[in-house]
Image (cartoon, grey):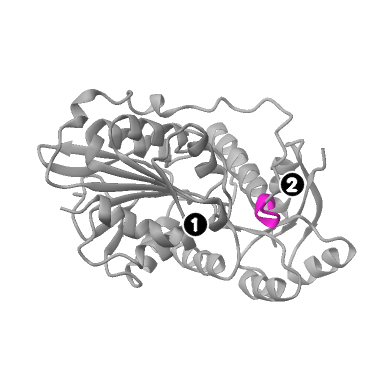
Amino acid sequence: MKKIRVLVVDDSAVVRQTLSEILQDDPGIEVMATASDPYVAVERIKRAVPDVITLDVEMPRMDGITFLERLMAQCPVPVVICSTLTEKGSETALSALEKGAVEIITKPKVGTKQFLEESRIRICDAVKSAALVRVASRVPPPSLRPVAKKLTADAVLPPPVSDAMVQTTEKVAVIGASTGGTEALRRLLETLPGDAPGMVVVQHMPEKFTASFANRLNGLCQVTVKEAEDGDSVIRGQVLIAPGNRHTLLKRSGARYYVEVRDGPLVSRHRPSVDVLFRSAARYAGRNAVGVIMTGMGDDGARGLAELREAGAHTIAQDEATCVVFGMPQEAIKRGAATIVLPLGTIGAEILRRCAR
């Protein structure tokens, strides 16, 4: 099995070493070289073009965003931004997504065993996801090593029960996305009118990046977009983005829907997890919900979308042609979880139609 060749670009020797060790520990990944700045990276690329580049943002001589722009213009390679979590840094990293980067991950730091293990999972998954983006038809290499147990939504919330089936006057939409989702969500939300049904979104992103992401969408869309806070009501004209590193659940009190933001283990290798959001919607909204699963690698959300459909919800999967990575929708479709499969450009209209008063 051919390994994914990675070039690690970071001005910190400690980060280069830590990232290299994490990636090399996965038998499907090979660190072909490291570079302390973009100029050194160019020399490495001249010798051999990597499958994926992990890229820091703030570096001497040339910043990561400038390098990214030049790289995409001259020698496109899938780039995973590896950034610190400062507010300024998160804005810059989001800008990098607009300029062609495919993923954002958190720089690993010295800390608890759990943090380091979760970092390993996220970094390796991000690199494998990026490698898949390079050739849409390519199947990501399977892991050849024992991996951490992949928890289901059972770790956060019991399976849905039948009391969610009662119809109310309002409907809500729940959406899950991963790789390629930042741009896909922008395109989707820009099609919605200011009185669109209330929505809750899980987009796999690190902590603090989601606030900047929500703010950016809020400035582009007619609907109000904000990072979800515990207890926020789900109301018409507002989209709540699950905060990074926290699970977000849809809850109901009488006729009012609201969100609960909580800690918990990684579910389907993610926190926030689409499976957790979808299961909560199946449990507390049932046929009042519309579930949408979009572009992303892996299977987070596939089981939850099936639970939504079983609870009477209308469920939508993004089609392969418009996905950056077809993994999550494909897994949902295989499970029979999708009521309908649609291209990205028509999903907004389908949500509005199904949530019509």
For the point 13% across and 37% down, the residue is 253
User: Distance of mark 1 from mark 2, alpha carbons?
Assistant: 20 Å
Instruction: Answer left or right for 265 relative to 24.
Output: left
Instruction: Answer left or right for 23 relative to 344.
Output: right
Q: Determine the image quadrant of residue 37.
A: bottom right
| 132 in the magenta segment | yes
Residue type, mark 2 in image: Ser
Residue type, mark 1 in image: Leu
Image location of residue 242, percent across then percent down: 36, 49
Segment colored magenta: 131-136
For the point 37% across and 59% down, the residue is 211
Image location of residue 64, percent across then percent down: 64, 69
Q: Between residues 9 and 130, which one lies in front from this camera angle? A: 130
| 152 in the magenta segment | no
Q: Quadrant of the N terminus?
A: top right
Instruction: Answer left or right for 286 relative to 149.
Output: left
Q: Determine the image quadrant of residue 148.
A: top right
For the point 72% across and 67% down, the residue is 76
- The secondary structure that dominates the magenta segment is helix
- Can you identify the residue that label 1 sits on? 85
Image location of residue 255, percent across then percent down: 11, 41
Q: Between residues 245 and 321, which one lies in front from this camera angle? A: 321
Image location of residue 58, percent across then percent down: 61, 68
Q: Determine the image quadrant of residue 165.
A: top left
**Is label 2 in a helix, a strand or a loop?**
helix
Sequence-first tag of 1 and 2: 2
Q: Is residue 140 visible?
A: yes
Q: Is residue 269 visible?
A: no
Q: Which mark is residue 20?
A: 2
Q: Are marks 1 and 2 in contact (CB under 8 Å)?
A: no
**Is label 1 in a helix, a strand or a loop?**
loop
